[in-house]
Each structure stands twice: as structure tokens, then as C-alpha cells.
Amino acid sequence: MEHLVEAKALTKHFGTFAAVRGIDVEVRRGEAFGFLGPNGAGKSSTMRMIACVSGRTGGELKVLGMDPERDGPRIRARIGVVPQLDNLDLELTVRQNLQIYGRYFGMSRQQCREKAVELLEFAQLSDRADQEVEPLSGGMKRRLTIARSLVNDPELLLLDEPTTGLDPQARHLLWDRLFRLKQDGVTLIITTHYMDEAEQLCDRLVVMDGGRIAAEGSPGELINRYSTKEVLELRFQPGAEKPDLERFAERVEVLPDRLLLYTQDGEHTLAKVHEHGVQPIQSLVRRSSLEDVFLRLTGRTLVD
Amino acid sequence: MTRTLDPANKTAPASVGLVWRVIPPGLYGGRASTLVERSALVNRRGWFVLVGGAFEPILFLWSLGLGFGQFVASVAGPDGRPVSYAAFVAPALLAASAMNGAVYDATFNVFFKFKYAKLYDAMLATPMGPLDIAMGEIAWALLRGGLYSAGFLGVMLAMGLIASPWALLALPAALLVAFAFAAVGMAATTFMRSWQDFDLVQLAVLPMFLFSTTFFPLSVYPGWLQTVVTWTPLYHAIELMRGLTLGVVGWGMLGHVAYFAVLAAVGTVVAARRLGSLLLD
């Protein structure tokens, strides 16, 4: 089986609201696949359908070659799910959380005990094993949730915004764990609205907006296709008249206090801008990032 | 009705078809017992709460049986023969304790786990389905009710309030009663929106506790109230317990058993289906 997830014209409606409006997605074995998009883009709805906890309204969906509609429990037995919000069992200890979760998958008590020790190690929580869950830090709870999702040795791991709300140290530690999983051959599907996370983790991703797929490719491909190699940022006094520099760049974006010039060579463009007599109060040349692609595709308007 | 005689198109027998209509596949993963295991694990540390709950009916029995017993020499038993007040009230308290233990677990505790702890969301990410959750939680609630009942039966025995070996059947009867109350309680909980709605549970349980012939025979009530009382589940539970512990047994008791079997089955299926529609949207 080449594709662990195959969706064709997949749709999801909640009453009259269309959360997912016909998407085609293929996730290959062993890759890390990302769903990017602003809030309300339909990422989580898609994840829930793949996790077999939400029925589809239309289209086709195959997970591990099976139909979630018919084989939900069998598919769930072979995948791991890290939900957006930790739903750990606060009435149990760290270790018990892992053990009882294994029991839900039908593992023997002995297997659960052994697996818990291994996963505590992986999540770097061995020294907290027999403590309550509640006092753990956000990063620790997140690692425990991820460890819990691995209890059944899943072939496919679904992570819904895995690092939202974590501090940088906790995020990097978590990324490190996810890399290790990928090296072990686990296929990852990640939703995120952090571009650095997507660039770090994902081999391939789709950008979703308004329930549709706006673009698909590897981070590098998307940057090539939807942005330029470099971006020149020119900062002006707020409210000052901004010069028209359209002819110096492939694309110019006008922000309240800045101009963004999308160009293949930022320094060269800056020199030409200076030649033209434009004097910004600050200038910065940087490489194009996925964030530029994202904002181009989904717009700068705030969606809540 | 016409019948197609296509052998290749033979569908499952009608009975199986009905079962799958009521309980669609995917609702049940066959692992309800692990949920009971979880509850046992949680309560290993809170065992005193469990034991504490068993004392309530015993206190009632002592205060009413010993106190009231001084003023009321005897009451007409199920077959009309007089019995001591304590022997009259004790089986009713047995039924009420089965009800209380089960209802408490299946409503407050389930609501917390469902709404706030998001425990069932985590379980549904495994091969378990809503029916596993409903059955597991109801099983725990009925075990708890059964535990209270067993303790209480022991106290009754020690106080000489058991008049017949039929009383042995009072324990399985109490389990059935607890099962029914837990199932209906859990089904009701799936309709609750906030903690305020739980006043309704009190509103149902307390009058039932006071009026379902727990403390007085049915004959003291006016005719219309008698009719209402005979509809309540606790009345049927008390009739069952009183008959068994006092040794007044008849075929009519199977009617009470059937009443609870139906409540238990309907409650479980409704609870599972509601959980399914709420959590698997």
C-alpha cells in the first residue's frame, strides 16, 4: 500500500456550513505531511475524518486502505491521535495514563507495563512516572499525550497543532521527538499554523483556506512557485507617502508601515531603490519563507 | 409485500438486522471491560468515598428503624401479615441504595468525564466505540450499587431483618435495579447541558425516595397518588426487595424484573447512541 490516506472530493458539512469543500489528498507511507491554514480552514475537520471520529458528508476517503465508515475500529487500532487539546486522564498517574490507554487497544497488562516504561523514556518523563498529571508543565503534558498516542505502535500518527502554546525549548524538544518517529518509519500528518514548524517537519504539505486546498507541494516547491527567492523589506514612517517601486520587483506588497518587494536578488534591488533616491528608515533583505507563501495564498485579513 | 428470490442477495436474518439498526457497527469495539478497569484504578485511591456511600442507608435504617420502631409496633407486610417497622423499611432502603449509588455515578461522574475531562474523546480515538463507553460506565455504576447493596444486606442479616432464604436473590435483584437506574441516568446525562440541569435529577430522585412506599405502605396515599407511585421505578424495586427479604414470593415479581430489564436495555442503547451522535459528529 503506497498511500496511507487517499481522499477524493472529500467534503464535510455541519448543518448548512461547509467545513471541507471537496479536497483531494494523498499521504505516502513514511512521509511527514502537513495541513496548513488559518483557523477555520477545515484542517481539524479533515483530521477528524481521517481519525474515523467524524463521518464524511461526501467524496471518498481511504485510510490504511480501508473505509472509515465501515472499518472505523480497525483503522483506529492502527493509528495514533494527538488532539489539539490534551485530554489526559487527570484521575490517573503519568504511568497509568499510558498503561490504561494500551488496555483500550486490547493489549495485555504485561505488554502495557513494558510499553509504558519505553514510552516514558521516549517522552523524557521517567522521573515523573508515578506522579499526578495535573501539575506537569504544558510541554510535559504534550509529550505525554504524544507518548500515549504511540502506545499501539501506530503506522500513522495524526498531530493536530502539536506545539501550540508551548515555549521554544518545549517546541524544539517536541520536534526532536517527532523527527525520531519519522526516522523510525512512522508516517506523520500534522496540522499547524506555524510556518517554521511546517518547514522543519513536513516533506509535503497542502495549504487549506475556506475548506479548499489552495496549494500543494514541498516547502521549497511552494516557495519557488508562490514567492521569490528573496524578499526586501523597506520600512517607512507610519503614514508617510510610499513610493511606487513596482518596476523594481516581481511583486510588491503594501503594508501600513512597510513595503515588501519580492525579488530574486534583494541586495541588487536595494541598490536600485537607493539609486532611485528612495530613503526608507530601515531595510532588510531576507530569504522567502513559507510564511510569505501562506500570506499570499490566504490573505492578510484576520479570520477568527 | 413481494420477496425477491435472489439467493446471492440474501440478507442477514431479520433479528440480526434489527440489532444492527439499533446498534450500528462501529458503535461497539468489545472492550467495555477496560473502562471498568479504569474506574477500579481510579477508585483504588478513593476507596473511602466508596465505603462512605454505603453508610448512608445504614444510618437511615438505624435512625428510622430504631426511632420510628418505638412508635410503630408493626406494619402490614406484602402479604398482609404484620412485620416490624424495621423489617418493612430495610428492603426499601436496600432498593434506594442501589438506586442512589448507580444514579450518582451515571450522572454527575459521567457528566464530568464527558464534558470537562474529555475522557471519552480520548477513548474514541482507540478501537472503543460509544457502546463500550456506555456499557463500561454503566457496569461500574452497577458494581458500585451492588457493593452498597451487599454491605446493606449484611447489615440486615446481622440485625435479624431477613426472614427468608429468598433474600439471597435480593443481591442479583439489586444489581438489576442498579443497572436500570445507571442506564437511564446515563442516558439522561447525555441530554444535560450544564450543572444546573442536575437539579432535575434531584427532583426525580428525592420524591421517589420519599414516596415510593419506602417509609409508608401504599395504602396511606390518596388514590391518584397511589397510581402515580406504582409507575415509579423505585416502587417496583421496593416491591421486589420486600418480597424477597420477607419471603413473600410470587410469579408477579417477574413483572418487576421485566420492567427493569427493559429500562436497562433502553437506557444503554439510548446512552450509546447519544454519545455517538454527540462525540462522533
Image (spheres, coloured by chain):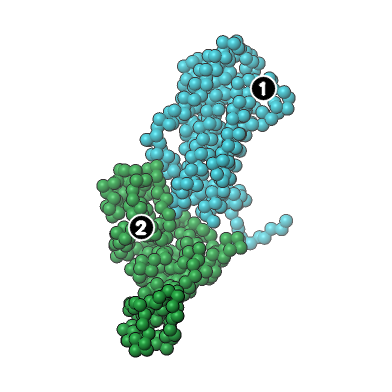
Dot 2: few (<14), some (14–19), or many (≥20) neighbours within 10 Å? Answer: some
Amino acid type at image mark 1: Leu
User: Measured along the vertical axis of the image, is residue A231 above or below residue A33?
Assistant: below
User: Measured along the vertical axis of the image, is residue A17 above or below residue B42?
Assistant: below
Tally of numbered discs: 2
Measured from the top left, where is residue B206 in percent x and y?
A: 59, 30
User: Disc 2 and disc 1: Cα gap in Å?
Assistant: 64 Å
Q: Which chain is green?
A: A
User: Measured along the vertical axis of the image, is residue B185 above or below residue B96?
Assistant: below
Residue B164 at least partly seen: no
- Quarter of the image for the C terminus of chain B: give it: bottom right
- Quarter of the image for the N terminus of chain B: give it: bottom right
Residue on which disc 2 sits = A166
Q: Image point 58% across, 63% down: which residue?
A: A17
From the viewer's perspective, tell me whether residue A99 is left or right of residue B241.
left
Measured from the top left, where is residue B259 in percent x and y?
A: 62, 34
Q: Image point 61% across, 25% down: which residue?
A: B210
Chain under callout 2: A
Residue on which disc 1 sits = B218
Measured from the top left, where is residue A232 in percent x and y?
A: 36, 80
Q: Which chain is cyan?
A: B
Amino acid type at image mark 2: Leu
Dot 1: few (<14), some (14–19), or many (≥20) neighbours within 10 Å? Answer: some
Secondary element at tag 2:
loop
Residue A26 or residue B246, whichever sits in front: A26
Q: Image point 57% across, 14% down: which residue?
A: B68
